[in-house]
Image (cartoon, helix red, strand yellow):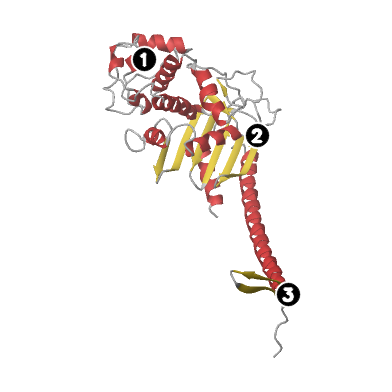
Amino acid sequence: MELPKYSYENPIIYNGIFAIFIKIPKMNIIIKKIKIVVFTIALTMCNYFYAQTNQTERELDALFQKALQSKTFNGNVLVAKKGKIIYEKAFGQADASNSIPLNKEYRFHIGSIAKEFNAVGIMMLKEQGKLKLDDSVSKFLPELPSWANKIKIIHLLQYTSGLPQIKWNEVNQDSDNMAFLLKTSTLDFEPGTQYDYNNNNVFLQRRIIEKITNMSFNSFVIQKILKPIGIKNAIVDPDDKEPLFAKSFNKEGKPDVLKYNISGWTALNLEDFYKWSEAINSFKIISKQSTRELFEPFSKDNQTGLGGGTIENGKVTSHTHDGAAFNYQALLVSNPSFTIILMTNNKQNNLEGFSNSIETILNK
């Protein structure tokens, strides 16, 4: 048998030991073959995942193109999978004129999801030592009647204050609503004993933030919450003249008259909405403990300052919130596997159905 022919290069002596480096000509060929196999496997896997992504995108596109044709969805959609955006598109019209197409830069009202900003603002001030959740409302708003001594900030966050509902037909601005509260003599129930989803809880959270920070709530949201996390396009209480702001209309194509009975409603585009969701999930704005407290409902299935959500093993395992105002409607569904954001300016109360369909496509 013929032995392999080795070549000997650069003999050296190390600690008294004579050593020779052996060069095996065939070894380079073997390494090259291994590299080719590894590259081929990697390329095959990339092609597989690319094909899967393309198939998912095609199915999502088919879903919303069909909805657009049947006039069951007019709005913007974002889908992310494991932290990566895989689908982001706009469908339909920016207003009732049917002449301006939506694009991904358009901002939408997100209804009650905008209440997350005052809830997070409250927790930011708590972390700064400027308030405690057990503090009474009267500590910051002493002008309110004596019932404010019994309402704690935690009651506002959990919608258990006992405050009466806002009289939407009589309230046209913040001052009207404050005047109504100043004349209110009794609460609907003892604070902390019942749940009542009520915007007066939100109204007083925003006034407390203003009193502590000496800033308008709208400025506080932009300057202290959104800009620090890279959200640049958000607007609070936009008017009809605001560019790239979707105007809502009903099924008959009639436009809404935009009106803010109480102030403080943030509008977002898809990119900024996703940044907000990711900031909550990564505890970028408030701590894990503060987030956990905001997710804690008064009782099962009740809304909280963040809608609804769970934290397990130190991670956000779910965050779901829906909102509506006029003919705007929005939905956020986020978990470690995917995030779905839907916004429409032509409310048809079907966003949950679309979210379920998207989840089915993602799970294939």
The foreground one among 333 and 349 is 333
Quarter of the view holding residue 312: top left
Q: Residue at x 56, y 35 (%)?
A: 275
- Give me the disc on residue 69: none
Is the residue under label 3 in contact with that under label 2 (CB below 8 Å)? no
Quarter of the view holding residue 209: top left
Please tell me which of labels 3 and 1 falls first in the chain: 3
Q: Is residue 200 left or right of residue 58?
A: left
Is the residue under label 1 in contact with that under label 3 (CB below 8 Å)? no
Q: Which residue is mark 1?
A: 140
Q: Which residue is mark 3?
A: 25
- Say if residue 279 shows up in the picture: yes
The foreground one among 322 and 34 is 34
Quarter of the view holding residue 189: top left
Q: Which type of secondary structure does the marked residue at label 3 adopt?
A: helix
Please tell me which of labels 2 and 1 falls first in the chain: 2
Q: CA distance from mark 3 to mark 1?
A: 82 Å
